[in-house]
Image (cartoon, rainbow, N blue to C red):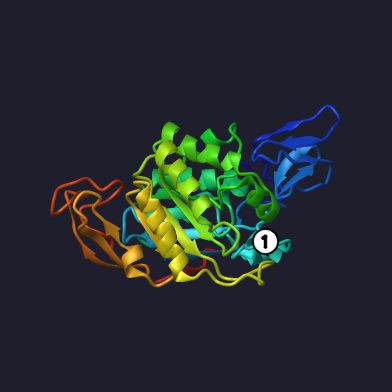
Amino acid sequence: MGNTNSDLYRGRFWEKRPDGRIRCGLCPRYCTLDEGQRGFCFVRKNVGGRMILTAYGRSSGFCIDPIEKKPLNHFYPGTSVLSFGTAGCNLGCKFCQNWDISKSREFDRLTDAASAKEIAQAAKNLGCASIAFTYNDPVIFAEYAMDVAEAAHEMGIKTVAVTAGYITEQARPEFFRRMDAANVDLKAFTDDFYRKITLAALQPVLDTLVYLKTQTNVWLEITNLLIPGENDSDKELHAMTQWIAEKLGTDVPLHFSAFHPDFKMLDHPPTPPVTLTRARAIALSKGLRYVYTGNVHDSQGASTYCHHCGQVLIERDWYRLGGYHLKNKNHCDTCGAVCAGHFDEKPGIWGGKCVPVHLGR
């Protein structure tokens, strides 16, 4: 554990270059920084020839959320999760819906401060089953998230990364071995979209998804935000869902989420509900067993069904659970087929409420 003063905390995942600059190895941008220069993410900085984390130990705020909001539908349904983020991001999404946090260059956004142990203790005191690193991408505050995760595990609290998966092969193992679950935001399935609209690249994200599924025990779910005219064509949806089925398997839950105009894409209309329904049908046609719709009121598209007999296993209305038909943790109570995921004998009772909390010293 390093110095908890965010102005002095030394980062990891970097190297010194022969010309005196330092090169970040955390994300595929590999930013090379002169003295005093910040990376694309804005929170990693060259100070005296070392990588300094300017947002370590500081947060844009804490909130107790339902785990379904992350979204994770197969990771202890109905439980509460203590969620927080920092500032900055290593992607440049023109449609960012948390742009006031992820694009922030003003550190007065970081109004809350807490050590790793304080966050873990707060989660335990508040009765949260897990801690989520979210709002902006935890990859850029990896060291802080990793420290919090270690403290959380010591107290029996699980950890969740909500991420775009834009991380290097070298940094993946260190980061994800401290996570119990991840929702990876697969922005689209073309490199053209990633290059033009997120200022990033597709392949590293696909590599992260394959790594998580084949090399770790991290519970994985995927979110795909559908933007009209940009990434919602039948061709792209067929290609993406076929790739998921072949490379990740049919048990990985996939969430299609509705776009709402924001940030630099105010000229695009909201996603019609019919688009989500169409995307879900395409994914199901590829054999994917658990496909959901989000950001719209669609109880059918939000609920979990038995892949064998079609019984409703978990009924959802927004983030609230209704009928619950799993027995022995993860078996359909009608036919006995196994539902993939992590479940307790009974679902949590947190409900759909989101409660802001303040952990500042």
Q: In this view, does 94 lie above or below 2?
A: below
Residue receiving disc 1? 94
Left/right of residue 1 with respect to residue 339 in the rendered view: right
Question: Looking at the picture, how far across and down is residue 159, in whole percent?
Answer: 43, 49
Residue at 54% from the left image edge and 40% from the top image edge: 206
For residue 324, what is the image quadrant? bottom left
> Could you say which is closer to the camera, residue 10 or residue 235?
235
Q: For the residue marked with disc 1, what is the amino acid?
A: Lys
> Could you say which is closer to the camera, residue 4 or residue 12?
12
Picture quarter with the N terminus = top right
For residue 101, what is the image quadrant? bottom right
Left/right of residue 304 with respect to residue 27 in the rendered view: left
Question: Looking at the picture, how far across and down is residue 287, in whole percent?
Answer: 34, 46
Question: Which residue is the extreme one toward the right?
Answer: 19
For residue 205, what is the image quadrant? top right
Residue 238 seen in this snapshot: yes
Question: Looking at the picture, how far across and down is residue 70, in whole percent?
Answer: 45, 58
Residue at 59% from the left image edge and 46% from the top image edge: 139
Residue at 40% from the left image edge and 52% from the top image edge: 283
Picture quarter with the C terminus = bottom right
> Could you say which is closer to the camera, residue 54 or residue 40?
40
Q: In this view, does 2 lie above or below 332?
A: above
Callout 1: few (<14), some (14-19), or many (20+) C-alpha neighbours within 10 Å? some
